[in-house]
Amino acid sequence: MASTPERRFETGRSCGKTRGPDVPRYHFDLVDSETVADERGAELPDDMKAMDVAEEIARRLLEEHPELKGRHFSILVTNEDGEEVGRMPLDVLH
């Protein structure tokens, strides 16, 4: 992968108040042919909110690193079991 912004990626955020052990944790990895893993993740109420956060992260990355546009990067959202929830391609954002 050519010139990624960072090799280690952290959301560095907790969205909302912790509601106890039933609140799922999601991870937001930056991916193309390789993965830049989100080390911390975020506790969120559900998959829909996780996808909203993925869009926020994608927009922030494009603002900070416009060179990522057109290079087929995505934010891969996984739940605490490692199952894919969805992907937010950076190229589809305006």
Image (cartoon, helix red, strand yellow):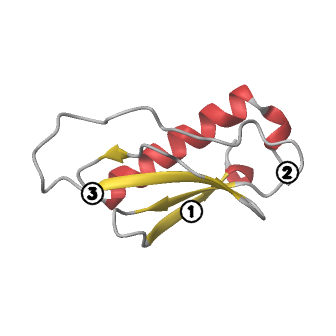
Mark closer to the chain start, 1 or 2: 2
Judge from the rendering whether residue 76 lies leftward or rightward of residue 21; answer left or right.
right
| Residue nearest the observer in this picture, 39 or 12 | 39
Answer yes or no: do the residues labelled 1 and 3 have beta carbons within 8 Å?
no
- Residue at x-position 34% and y-position 60%: 47
Q: Which residue is mark 1?
A: 87
Query: Callout 2: few (<14), some (14-19), or many (20+) C-alpha neighbours within 10 Å?
Result: few
Q: Which residue is mark 2?
A: 70
- Residue at x-position 51% and y-position 51%: 28
Please provide percent x and percent y for residue 61: 66, 35
Judge from the rendering whether residue 10 lies leftward or rightward of residue 13; answer left or right.
right
Q: Quadrant of residue 51?
A: bottom left
Q: Secondary structure at mark 3?
A: loop
Give the CA separation, mark 1 to mark 3.
15 Å
Please provide percent x and percent y for residue 52: 43, 47
Residue type at the position of mark 2: Gly
Residue 46 circle label: 3
Q: Quadrant of the N terminus?
A: bottom right
Q: Quadrant of the C terminus?
A: top right
